Image (cartoon, grey):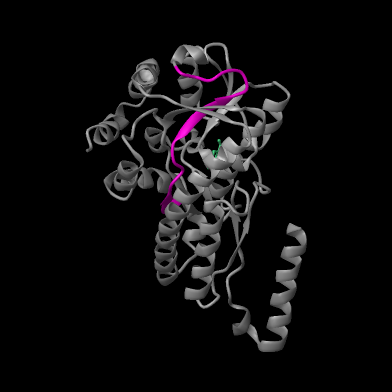
């Protein structure tokens, strides 16, 4: 499929050049966009609207194609590829970015944000700016912060009401040592694994469960194979629509301004769509047989996961002030 696209665009350029003269084929190549989610997911809809706005406002000079469903590769691989410019843009969770961009790890600390509105406020201000700087230094330019709600544990064995219920469970986590430490702090067995492999791994018993927000738990059908969903809401990890620095540097200042503006518009749209999808997903999983349990007091989970902070802060003294900035915010 990729090959035929490339052939098509080369063919188009040759025809354009031959018929219309050199100036007519000056339009930039079509950008390649990575997305892990299904096409009707809030992220996917917002990305499409971003690209449509960019195409329109640049008068067709910057166009792009978004490859949904993770067909361009797993998230950890795609993060490396966007840094190299093999992928031009994409929508990423900051979770798996932590392995290569330490600043992004501060939002992967359990219970760091007090609420989703607080996360929005901080990401749209100084905290987002500091994290964005770290990303740019590693070749990734953020264009908008997207919402991914809060992540909670689900599994096929038992509801989780207390940290001790995690003991002995095999839990899939995103690729990042922080999440391994988080599960181990409750004596669970953590397995880092690509998102696309989780359904089959739960089904065949390789793992007992995983943790994610309601739309991802639902859109992947994980709820069919892990029917206890326990609302620990231990991680509020923002996501970003971002562009490869290599691609960014090829854009004119006018095109960069359009990309930034469209990134922000798409973030606003995504946040709105997210609210509706979260509610719809909760309905769907419950209708599909999931048992949901709320956690009235999350303090025992916070206490159990505290060593994750201690280790992180000891290993990253330069990030202590950023962590404190978030923790002391209203
Ligand atoms: C989803 C994120 C996606 C991650 C996935 C995961 O939107 O970027 O890849 O979780 O758990 O919520 O891997």
Look at the image and say whether residue 147 sits in the magenta stretch. Answer: yes
Q: Residue at x 69, y 27 (%)?
A: 201
Q: Residue at x 75, y 73 (%)?
A: 11
Q: Nearer the viewer, residue 201 or 283?
A: 283
Residue 14 seen in the figure: yes
Percent across and percent down for residue 245 are: 47, 54
Which quarter of the picture shows residue 197?
top right
Q: Is residue 20 above or below residue 322?
A: below
Left or right, 316 with respect to 78, comes to: left
Look at the image and say whether residue 277 sits in the magenta stretch. Answer: no
Percent across and percent down for residue 266 are: 45, 60
Q: Which residues are magenta?
A: 141-161
Placement of the C terminus among the 4 image quadrants: top left
Residue 142 seen in the figure: no
Which quarter of the picture shows residue 135?
top left
Query: Which quarter of the rendered image does ligand 1 occupy?
Result: top right
Percent across and percent down for residue 116 are: 36, 41
Left or right, 241 with respect to 132, comes to: right
Percent across and percent down for residue 203 are: 71, 27
Q: Is residue 182 above or below residue 261?
A: above
């Amino acid at each position: 499929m990729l090959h035929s696209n490339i052939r098509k665009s080369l063919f188009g350029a040759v025809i354009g050049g031959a018929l219309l003269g050199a100036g007519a084929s000056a339009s930039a190549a079509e950008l390649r966009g990575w997305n892990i989610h299904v096409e009707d997911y809030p992220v996917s809809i917002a990305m499409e609207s971003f690209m449509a706005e960019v195409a329109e406002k640049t008068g067709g000079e910057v166009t792009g194609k978004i490859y949904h469903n993770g067909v361009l590769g797993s998230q950890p691989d795609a993060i490396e590829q966007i840094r190299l410019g093999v992928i031009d843009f994409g929508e990423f969770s900051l979770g798996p970015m932590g392995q290569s961009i330490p600043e992004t790890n501060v939002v992967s600390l359990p219970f760091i944000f007090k609420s989703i509105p607080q996360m929005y406020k901080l990401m749209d201000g100084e905290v987002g700016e500091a994290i964005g700087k770290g990303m740019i230094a590693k070749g990734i330019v953020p264009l908008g912060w997207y919402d991914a709600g809060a992540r909670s544990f689900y599994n096929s064995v038992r509801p989780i009401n207390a940290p001790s219920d995690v003991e002995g469970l095999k839990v899939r986590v995103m690729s990042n040592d922080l999440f391994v430490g988080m599960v181990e702090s409750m004596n669970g067995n953590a397995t880092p694994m690509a998102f696309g492999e989780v359904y089959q791994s739960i089904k065949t018993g390789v793992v007992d469960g995983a943790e994610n927000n309601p739309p991802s738990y639902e859109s992947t059908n994980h709820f069919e194979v892990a029917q206890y969903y326990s609302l620990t809401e231990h991680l509020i990890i923002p996501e970003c629509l971002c562009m490869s620095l290599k691609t960014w540097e090829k854009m004119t200042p006018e095109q960069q301004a359009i990309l930034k503006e469209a990134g922000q518009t798409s973030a606003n749209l995504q946040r709105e769509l997210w609210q509706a999808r979260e509610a719809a997903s909760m309905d769907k999983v419950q209708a599909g047989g999931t048992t949901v349990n709320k956690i009235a007091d999350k303090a025992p989970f916070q206490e159990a996961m505290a060593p994750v902070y201690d280790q992180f802060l000891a290993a990253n003294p330069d990030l202590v002030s950023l962590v404190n900035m978030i923790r002391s915010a209203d």
